[in-house]
């Protein structure tokens, strides 16, 4: 089947009227598709009969000093990737057709989930994500929606919104895809030089240190975090923004590692902001 492309919610809604009998898998993205997105699409393809990908660089989730204008846009390449991956529908709404304006009703996730981790420095970011994801889920009304575990805070917040607002969709978290060096695939990796990419591998290396320590019986977050900081220190170019050990569902800080924990890092290399995390199961 050819890839169908729609640019407004009403066009997509019209098309979906005659496709509602299918099981719909939805992969919301901001474009600049990479192998991480492809793994989400592959899973959606495997589990549904109709696959919809959206590309929308959501202005609501960028702060005033962030990279909205520079964010990579490569529509023709993304379209070819979707065609090859067997996507049925590509939804590329404009800000106007998504109703982006000052008076737009916003979805505000619980502050306890947005005050730490990325929310500490990215004020309003998760409100922007929550608002747009809720709108997209209402427009597409998929059976399943697929999100990467690399954005662990985003995933936890979306799960909470879907549960609290009774949205009839299964949220599927998909494992992070990594380069051989361990660097998590991300659209923002395009900003990095080859040297920056090599240096960024320290993030995953340091997360693995935490995993080794927990496996050896360490339960005290300060000891675990200290080992991570030591490893991060081997690459002085890496500027740490945060390092936190939290409950994967509630995102609250953990005092003793006696259950599964999420250990998450954000920082900059070559002024590119990178995030990564792993969940360590007990
Ligand atoms: O993860 C992303 O690409 C975005 O935050 C999302 C979920 C598409 C919302 O704009």
Image (cartoon, rainbow, N blue to C red):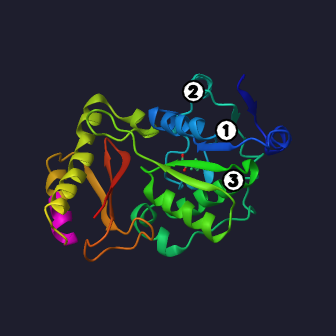
Question: 169 or 113: nearer the eye?
Answer: 169
* Disc ID at residue 85: 2
Question: Could you say where residue 241 lies in the image, as x and y percent from the top left?
Answer: 32, 58
* Disc ID at residue 137: 3
Mark 3 or mark 1, earlier in chain: 1
Question: 244 or 241: nearer the eye?
Answer: 244
Q: Is residue 222 magenta?
A: yes
Question: Could you say where residue 69 lies in the image, as x and y percent from the top left?
Answer: 55, 41
* Quadrant in the picture for residue 191: top left
- Crowd tier of the residue under label 2, counting other residues whose Cα lies within 10 Å: few below 14, some 14–19, many 20 or above: some
Q: In this view, does 153 lie to the left or right of 97?
A: left
Question: Could you say where residue 102 lies in the image, as x and y percent from the top left?
Answer: 72, 60
From the image, tell me which residue sits under label 1.
Answer: 52
For the stretch drawn in magenta, what is the main secondary structure?
helix
Q: Is residue 55 left or right of residue 188?
A: right
Residue drawn at point x = 25 percent, y = 76 percent: 256
Cα distance in 3D space between marks 2 and 1: 11 Å
109 vs 39: above or below: below
Which region shows up in magenta?
Answer: 220-227
- Judged by depth in the image, the label closer to the viewer, 3 or 2, is 2
């Amino acid at each position: 089947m050819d890839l169908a492309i729609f640019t407004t919610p009403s066009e997509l809604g019209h098309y979906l009227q005659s496709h509602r009998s299918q099981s719909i898998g939805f992969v919301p993205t901001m474009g600049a598709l990479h192998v991480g997105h492809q793994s989400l699409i592959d899973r959606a393809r495997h589990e549904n009969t109709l696959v919809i990908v959206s590309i929308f660089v959501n202005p609501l989730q960028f702060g005033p000093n962030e990279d909205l204008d520079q964010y990579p846009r490569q529509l023709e390449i993304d379209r070819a990737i979707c065609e090859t991956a067997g996507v049925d529908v590509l939804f590329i709404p404009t800000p106007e057709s998504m109703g982006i304006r000052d008076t737009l009703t916003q979805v505000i996730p619980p502050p306890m989930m947005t005050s730490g981790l990325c929310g500490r420095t990215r004020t309003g970011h998760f409100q922007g994500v929550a608002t747009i994801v809720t709108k997209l889920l209402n427009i597409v009304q998929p059976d399943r929606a697929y999100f990467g575990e690399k954005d662990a805070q985003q995933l936890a917040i979306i799960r909470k919104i879907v549960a609290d607002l009774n949205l009839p969709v299964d949220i599927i978290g998909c494992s992070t895809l990594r380069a051989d060096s361990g660097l998590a695939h991300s659209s923002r990796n395009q900003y990095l030089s080859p040297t920056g990419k090599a240096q960024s591998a320290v993030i995953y290396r340091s997360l693995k240190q935490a995993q080794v320590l927990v496996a050896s019986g360490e339960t005290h977050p300060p000891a675990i975090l200290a080992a991570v900081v030591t490893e991060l220190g081997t690459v002085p170019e890496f500027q740490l923004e945060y390092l936190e050990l939290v409950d994967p569902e509630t995102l609250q800080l953990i005092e003793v590692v006696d259950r599964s924990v999420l250990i998450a890092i954000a920082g900059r290399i070559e002024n590119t902001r990178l995030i990564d995390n792993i969940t360590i199961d007990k």
